[in-house]
Amino acid sequence: MTKLNTSNDRFKQAMLPSLIMGVLTNVFIFILFYWIGLKDAFYSPLIAIGVFLAGFFMLKMNLVSAQILFIVTGYILAFEVFIHTYYLGWNSGFFYFLFLLPIVFLLNTTWKNWAVISYNCSIVIIISLLRYWYFSQESAFPISEDVQANLSLLNASLTGIVVLVVMYYFSRTIEIKDEALIRANKKLGDRNIEISEQHKHLEVLLKEVHHRVKNNLQIISSLMSLQHRTVEDEEVAEVLNESIRRVEAIALIHQKLCQDEKGNRVDFNSYMHDLVESQKLLSPSVSFYYSSDKVVLSLDKSVPLGLIISEIITNSIKHAFDGIQYPTISIRLDKIGNNYSITVKDNGVGLPSDFNLDEPKSLGMEIVKALGDQIDADIHSKVVKGTSFIIVFEDKLEA
């Protein structure tokens, strides 16, 4: 659209001097007719002057398109050439003005191919008919051969002057616009550099924020661990232990965000590997396995998912392995079309017969359900040689 508008605007700039030159040329022709006494043809330059002036002001005020105005004035010029040639003969050289039409016509690059062919063919036909009718015919208004020759030279000269003026004005207009475009592009380039630098600065600040959040969460985790050592009540100690797991899961997310270039994406494969390693330290009697392709997820999905997986692992460790000799938890992440699927499976005793994730009876499962709803994830479970929790979600990560 911009290219089209630019081409139309340039053609408009070519039409404006063309119309002015048309007015001046017709003023000259009117004076010429008056000088030689050709009063019968006064109407021709006068009408053309009126049309060209009206077209000029209408074009300046954007009341008519340059293309339509060119077609109208072009054929009016052709009609004028017929009249003048009829009165003063072929050798008076008024047909030279017809060669202006294809030249100005082709200054507009937005014409359709059929328009270019049909218009230029029409000009060739007009010139051919003009020559066929008037080449050997005596002029209706008698003038000497010398006057005809001088007129022919004058009309050829006027045609050349019009071409030079239009081309100069057109090229000068393009030059001015190109200079303005270069200046605008330079300003845009400078602005883009400035925005890029600001963006890099914001990325550094964002990474610093994630780094500080991670440090603060680790401090909270350490304080809770110290408190855990002093607590004698087993239930309170277990609550603190679960809280420590949750805080560490969030802190680990922010650690991964510090490593991302943009600070808003998480290498979830690396995150899960580190989460599994931390769980191994907390529960050395449980074997952990994790498999996944390289997956990068958004921050909005990663934090809830990390907590969901941590809660499911904690739930398995607390309730699934009573009497199990070799407790095992495996985690797998798969990409299925536009969706992702995370499966957390243990080889434990299975879920209670009345288990219903939609009506959780423990804080951990309440957290799993709430976070699943937050990220529009479909979470369901099945019991086959242990318990499997399957989390299916979508992540439209912006590049």
Image: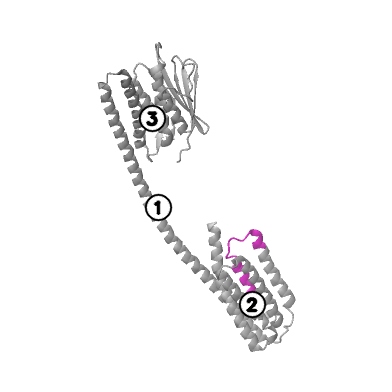
Circle 1 SS class:
helix
- The residue drawn where x is 38% and y is 51% is 195
- The residue drawn where x is 38% and y is 49% is 196
- Percent position of residue 79, x then y: 69, 75
**For residue 6, above or below residue 35:** above
Give whichever of discs 1 and 3 has the lower sequence position.
1
Q: Which residue is mark 3?
A: 271
22 relative position to 261: left or right? right
Number of the label disc, if any, that sits on residue 396 = none
- Percent position of residue 262, x then y: 38, 41
Give whichever of discs 2 and 3 has the lower sequence position.
2
Circle 2 Cα neighbour tier, 10 Å, few/some/many (<14 / 14–19 / ≥20) = many
Q: Which residues are magenta?
A: 93-117
Amino acid marked by disc 1: Asn
Front in this rendered view, residue 110 or 163: 110
Residue 158 appears in which quarter of the rendering?
bottom right
Q: Which residue is mark 2?
A: 48
Circle 3 SS class:
helix
Front in this rendered view, residue 326 or 384: 384
Separation of marks 1 and 3 at Cα, in angstroms: 34 Å
Circle 2 SS class:
helix
Colouring scheme, one of rainbow, by chain, secondary structure, one colour: one colour
Q: Which residue is mark 1?
A: 192
Residue 280 appears in which quarter of the rendering?
top left
113 within the magenta span: yes
For the N terminus, the image quarter is: bottom right
Amino acid marked by disc 2: Ala
Observer able to see residue 14:
yes
Q: Mark 1 or 3, which is nearer the eye?
A: 3
The image shows a total of numbered marks equal to: 3
